[in-house]
Image (tube, rainbow, N blue to C red):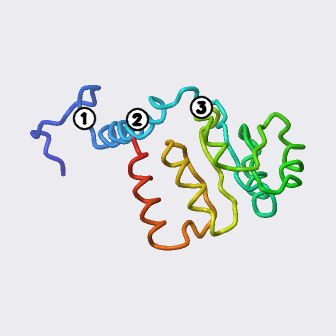
Amino acid sequence: MSDDSTPRREATGSALSRRRFHRATAAAALGAFAAPAVVRGRNLNERLAIACIGVGGRGASNLADVASEDVVALCDVYDGAVARAAEAHPKARKFKDFRKLFDDLKGYDAVVVSTTEHTHAFATLPALQLGKHVYCEKPLTHDVWEARRIREADRKSVV
């Protein structure tokens, strides 16, 4: 039996139901997570300008993985590897020494490091110091000292 004497809320638009509360909370959370990407993005449909260090062997595979982006620089000590990579990316600048690559700061957004293991830190460190995004094959460093230097550079590069 129901008691007709208890007042009931009318189903009006002003009452906040549990379902409306959850919808509003979910929408606010989604907006909070999406807003930083929209605010930071110059043009969210723009492709990244990527410099690849080490484009032969494993580096060729990494280069193929980022081929949908704008590959603007190719670097390898072996001229044959650079020549093969340049066939797929003819507009990319070619380098033999990765230190020369870091002279042009505005030419690229990110760096892919696929060099031999003992040179990973030496190619990664200058890129981080210049504020570039870096993908590096493992192992990142050869010893603890290099790891600490990379960690310090990474902390300083985060805005």
Verify CB contact (< 8 Å) between mark 2 and mark 3: no
Q: Is residue 43 above or below residue 122?
A: above
For residue 152, the mark is none
For residue 106, the mark is 3
Nearest the viewer among 121 and 113 is: 121
Residue marked by disc 2: 31
Label 2 and label 3: CA atoms lie apart by: 31 Å
Identify the residue at horizontal 50%, vertical 73% (top origin). 143
Residue marked by disc 1: 16
Q: Is residue 38 left or right of residue 116?
A: left
Nearest the viewer among 24 and 81 is: 81
Q: Is residue 42 above or below residue 80?
A: above
Q: Earlier in the sequence, mark 3 or mark 1?
A: 1
Identify the residue at horizontal 76%, vertical 49% (top origin). 96
- Residue 63, percent from left and from top: 76, 51
Identify the residue at horizontal 56%, vertical 66% (top origin). 140
Please, what is the three-letter code of the amino acid marked with disc 2?
Gly
Q: Earlier in the sequence, mark 1 or mark 2?
A: 1
